Each structure stands twice: as structure tokens, then as C-alpha cells.
Image: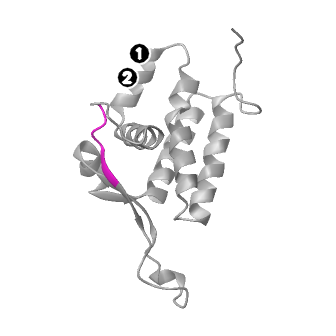
Amino acid sequence: MATFKGYFELKTPADLLQKLAYDLARIQAAPLDTYACFDFFITAEHMLDWLYPDDVIALQNKRLSETLLKVCSHLANGAKHFHARNRQHTSVTDTEKHDGPFDDSFDGSFDTCGLVVHLDGDAAKKYGPEIDAEELAELVFAYWQKDLAAKKLL
């Protein structure tokens, strides 16, 4: 069986963080881009796999100890598998595309469009009952940026 490490030019957790930055910029440029949001949260979910490739216990402990990572995992697995069935996924109740009530004749200050994540449990206590996917992505990116810097991987 052939084995390889990385994915084309993505070889390290720092490279994967750069991909997260790229996907976050796509979300910020187009808040209704479901594809960019999908790409971001799938990538963010796998940061742990890249950081702990040989330590499943450390990986799971980290994933289950951080509310933000639980939300990310629930979103990623719900997207990837269409329905997150694992009992550990208790953070997200739904996702919704909100187009906003105003047309292009209004300036951006009236724009209320975005992708909304409805939260439950500890996530709702920490972030409220719902959070804009762009804001959530910014929090996740900041988390990983800080984590990789602390590990001196940047």
C-alpha cells in the first residue's frame, strides 16, 4: 500500500491554516457562499488530525474539551455525512441561509444576509442561540492561529 503525507503543497498544519485563511476570505467576500463555508469547516475539523496524526486519544480529548471545536466538528460531520448521527454531536440544531429582506438598491448597512448556525447546549450558553457562520469561522480561525503559534508551528 502506498502512503503519502500531506496533500500536494499542503504538507504541515501551518499550510492547512493558510488554507483556512483562504476559505475564510471566501466566506467574508461572499457571506452566502455555502461551498466556502463547507470547505472552511471541513478543513478546520481536520486541523486536529494534522496536529495529532498518531495520537487518537489526544485528538479526541482536545476535540471534546473545547466548545468551539465541538461546534466545528458537528458542522463538519453534519455537512460531510449529510446528517451528524454521532451522540457526541450536541452543539448544532440547524443551519439556515438567510437572504435578508433588502434588495441591491439599499446600501450594505441594511444587509442582513448570511449563513446562520443554530446552537444548543454549551455552545448556545457560550455563543448564544445562533451565530453567523462568518463570525463562527473567524473565531475558529483565531483559535487555530493562536494554537499553532503557541506550539511554535507558525
Whether residue 154 is visible here, answered yes or no, is no
Placement of 85 over or under 3, stated as above or below: below
Whether residue 33 is visible here, answered yes or no, is yes
Question: Which residue is farthest front?
Answer: 82
- Residue type at mark 1? Ile
Q: What residue is rendered at 68% in x and 28% in y?
A: 12
Using the image, tell me which numbered label, if any, was put on residue 61: 2
Q: Secondary structure at mark 2?
A: helix
Q: Is residue 29 left or right of residue 147?
A: right
70 and 42: which is toward the camera: 42
Q: What residue is rendered at 25% in x and 48% in y?
A: 120
86 and 114: which is toward the camera: 86
CB within 8 Å, label 1 to label 2 = yes
Q: Quadrant of the C terminus?
A: top right
Question: Which residue is farthest bottom?
Answer: 105
Q: Is residue 22 left or right of residue 59?
A: right
Instruction: Identify the residue position indicated by label 1 in the image.
Output: 57
Q: Secondary structure at mark 1?
A: helix
Q: Position of residue 85 (x, y in %)?
A: 32, 34
- Residue type at mark 2? Asn
Q: How many marks?
A: 2
Q: Is residue 139 left or right of residue 33?
A: left
Q: Position of residue 76 (x, y in %)?
A: 45, 40
Placement of 107 over or under 40, stated as above or below: below
